[in-house]
């Protein structure tokens, strides 16, 4: 790790209604959600004019949720890559080292994620599975409902969660990042207290917001045809019993020193983090190293529970490795104070998508 003489900073801009103005994407970091994100408003995202429906097929979108306490870790993903949709739910029992993993893939565009988070909902139905997401920032909450019916392969799972994203408790981060030409991506991330209930095969699991935290993330983008992304994320309480979490990504965006999607939260306070290099000398199943050149990020990730899936068809190929494990090392907040990371449970994600 190389440490620079001056700590990294990134401008947090005044809130705006949309990251697109007069057909041109705006790039930067904000601490409030946009009123609307419609990437179809970008003028000429490709070199040649293409119909609106073609542009729509190139926009990928997903929302992901996490909820962790001392005993359980939940990770849920709902994505629409336009040629197909996928819902994935992973619940890990830390005490008994057991996991529940459900994945549903459906062809076609189907449900679309909302263009605003003020008060919008999306739901999906299929055999043995239902979900509903109510993004309600106007009321300071995000709600997630999931129902997975029992089959011969897995027990039933019911989830009702509420993320407290009220302004007095949470400072979110919204970013708009350039990819190539006029093409861009958007991300909204918030670390929030979580409360709710889960029932796994008749076993009730209560989550209380004084001990449970979670990330809510919303993404849209004109991502490359061959997309590579690596994400490192963890949530916990530090030695001073402060709620904290980090969400760090290495992707294909440009000018990452000026703008990226990396951040640390401590008791609701947001610290934008610099770009990082994530290396996996022994592959995704072995230890990961996450470092920057500013002296603010110096982490290792040791996988404990391996999870992976993939899909290979004529028109698409996907590989996703998402092990769960423990982070150790150090992060530095905007005040220059080091946050020691000691065996904090989290997840690593390494994605390759060709579609």
Image (cartoon, rainbow, N blue to C red):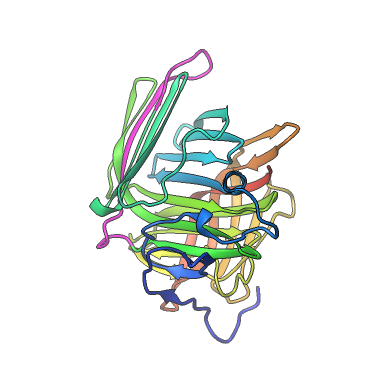
Q: Is residue 200 left or right of residue 227?
A: left
- Rendered position, 164 above or below 76: below
Residue 262 image position (x, y, % from top left): 52, 64
Q: Which residues are magenta?
A: 147-170
Vertical relation: 78 (above or below) 239: above
Across and down, in percent, residue 62 comes to 51, 45
Q: Is residue 114 visible?
A: yes
| Quarter location, residue 335 | bottom left
* Quarter location, residue 42: bottom right
| Residue projecting furthest to the top | 152
Residue 164 % position (x, y): 28, 51
User: Is 106 a magenta residue?
Assistant: no
Tally of numbered tags: 0
Left or right of 333 on screen, residue 299:
right
Nearer to me, 139 or 46? 46
Which quadrant is home to the N terminus? bottom right
Query: Which quarter shows the C terminus?
Result: top right
Q: 350 and 242: which one is in front?
A: 350
* Residue 344 visible in the displayed image: no
Relative to residue 320, is residue 315 drawn left or right?
right
Can residue 157 be found in the magenta stretch? yes
- Rendered residue at 47%/54% (across/down): 38
Residue depicted at 46% across the width and 51% down the height: 218
Residue 158 on image: x %, y %: 36, 27
Q: Nearer the viewer, residue 188 or 42?
A: 42
Q: Return the residue nearer the eye: 29 or 57.
A: 57
Residue at the bottom extreme, as displayed: 5
């Amino acid at each position: 790790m190389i440490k620079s003489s001056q700590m990294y900073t990134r401008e947090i801009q005044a809130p705006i209604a949309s990251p697109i103005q007069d057909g041109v994407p705006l790039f930067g970091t904000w601490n409030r959600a946009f009123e609307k994100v419609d990437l179809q408003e970008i003028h000429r995202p490709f070199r040649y004019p293409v119909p609106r429906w073609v542009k729509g097929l190139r926009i990928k979108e997903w929302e992901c949720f996490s909820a962790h306490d001392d005993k359980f870790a939940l990770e849920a993903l709902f994505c629409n890559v336009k040629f197909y949709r996928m819902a994935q739910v992973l619940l890990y029992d830390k005490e008994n080292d057991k996991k529940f993993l459900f994945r549903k893939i459906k062809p076609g565009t189907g449900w679309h994620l909302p263009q605003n988070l003020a008060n919008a909902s999306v739901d999906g139905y299929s055999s043995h599975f239902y979900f509903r997401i109510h993004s309600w920032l106007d009321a300071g909450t995000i709600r997630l409902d999931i129902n997975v019916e029992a089959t011969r392969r897995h027990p039933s799972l019911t989830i009702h969660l509420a993320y407290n994203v009220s302004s007095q408790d949470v400072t979110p981060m919204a970013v708009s990042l350039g990819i190539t030409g006029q093409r861009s991506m958007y991300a909204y991330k918030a670390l929030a207290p979580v409360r709710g209930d889960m029932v796994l095969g008749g076993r009730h699991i209560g989550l209380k917001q004084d001990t449970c935290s979670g990330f809510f993330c919303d993404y849209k983008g004109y991502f490359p045809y061959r997309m590579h992304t690596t994400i490192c994320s963890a949530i916990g309480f530090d030695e001073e019993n402060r709620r904290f979490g980090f969400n760090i990504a290495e992707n294909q965006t440009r000018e990452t020193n000026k703008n990226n999607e990396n951040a640390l939260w401590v008791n609701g306070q947001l610290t934008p983090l610099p770009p990082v290099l994530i290396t996996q000398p022994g592959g995704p199943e072995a230890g990961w190293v996450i470092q920057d050149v500013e002296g603010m990020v110096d982490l290792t990730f040791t996988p404990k529970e391996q999870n992976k899936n993939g899909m290979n068809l004529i028109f698409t190929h996907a590989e996703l490795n998402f092990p769960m494990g423990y982070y150790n090392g150090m992060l530095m907040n905007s005040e220059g104070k080091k946050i020691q990371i000691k065996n904090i449970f989290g997840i690593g994600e390494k994605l390759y998508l060709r579609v």
